[in-house]
Amino acid sequence: MTFSIVARSADGQSLGVAVASKFLGVGAAVPAALADVGAVATQSYANLAYRPQALALLATGVAAPETVAALIAGDAGPVDHRQVGVVGPGGPGATFTGGACHDWAGGVAGDGFAIQGNMLAGPQVVEQMHAAWLGSEGRLADRLLAALRAGDEAGGDRRGRQSCALLVVSKGMGYGGTSDVLADLRVDDHPAPVTELARLLEMHSLYFERPDPTTLITLEGETADEVRTRLAVTGDLDEALASWAGIENLEMRIVPGHIDPLVLAHLRATTQN
């Protein structure tokens, strides 16, 4: 009923899950992740207890394959109907598909990832997700989305589309540096959930990501003059810009003495000369 990927970034600093299903609010049931610990996706007659259990095992140093084995061994329910994927802070990911999961069902795992799905249009869903993951680079959120999109385009859940979610964690990289949740986006009920998730991720990047320091523009000369004019201020420019950015929900992109090109573009689009 669901297809998902759990994975670790190339630098090992981020962990995450992406999932889609013909199921209302799949993001509330399938994914879980903890920074520097691991990520898990539980699906197909999902045992939601797998989420805290898997993360607790990973936190003690148990590797992903052994974590999956322990989850299955300790499950008193219909194990043959379960499906789960786990990845830790190092080593290979692991996946399990019970023999009674609805066709097509299966998965693949490798260094830093696990992909799985059930009630799929066919094995091509997992195959295309695998290819997209291996062929992608850059931010973990983008790579997870690329894999999810590939699975969706390959047929995804054979019953249709309804919801999807993306969860990425990284130590201290959440809002204001006071959270480890880098991204937690959900589309609960939508005719094209993966497309909608991509739109939300683009918005999330603008509003919640820190700026690339190599692209920052120094607030001086003509740039400073333009910003002053657009903000209609004669006092402290940093203070005025920070105040405006807070109103526009762009406070994560403010760096004293500089302006992010994305912030400048937004300022130009929303103010008059």
Image: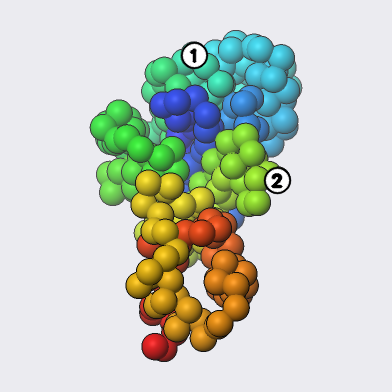
- Crowdedness near tag 2: few (<14), some (14–19) or many (≥20) residues, C-alpha within 10 Å: few
Q: Nearer the viewer, residue 80 or 232?
A: 232
Residue sticking out furthest to the bottom = 272
Q: Which residue is mark 2?
A: 178
Compared to 9, does 172 lie above or below? below
SS label for mark 1: loop
Q: Quadrant of residue 30?
A: top right
Q: Nearer the viewer, residue 131 or 225?
A: 225
Q: From mark 2 to mark 1, how far is it between C-alphas? A: 28 Å
Provide residue 74's location: percent of width, then percent of height.
72, 17
Provide residue 196's location: percent of width, then percent of height.
42, 62
Q: Is residue 3 visible?
A: no
Q: Quadrant of the C terminus?
A: bottom left
Q: Residue at x 55, y 71 (%)?
A: 237
SS label for mark 2: loop
Q: Which residue is mark 1?
A: 91
Compared to 40, does 180 lie above or below? below
Name the colour scheme: rainbow
Provide residue 241's location: percent of width, then percent of height.
55, 71
The residue type indicated by label 2 comes to: Thr
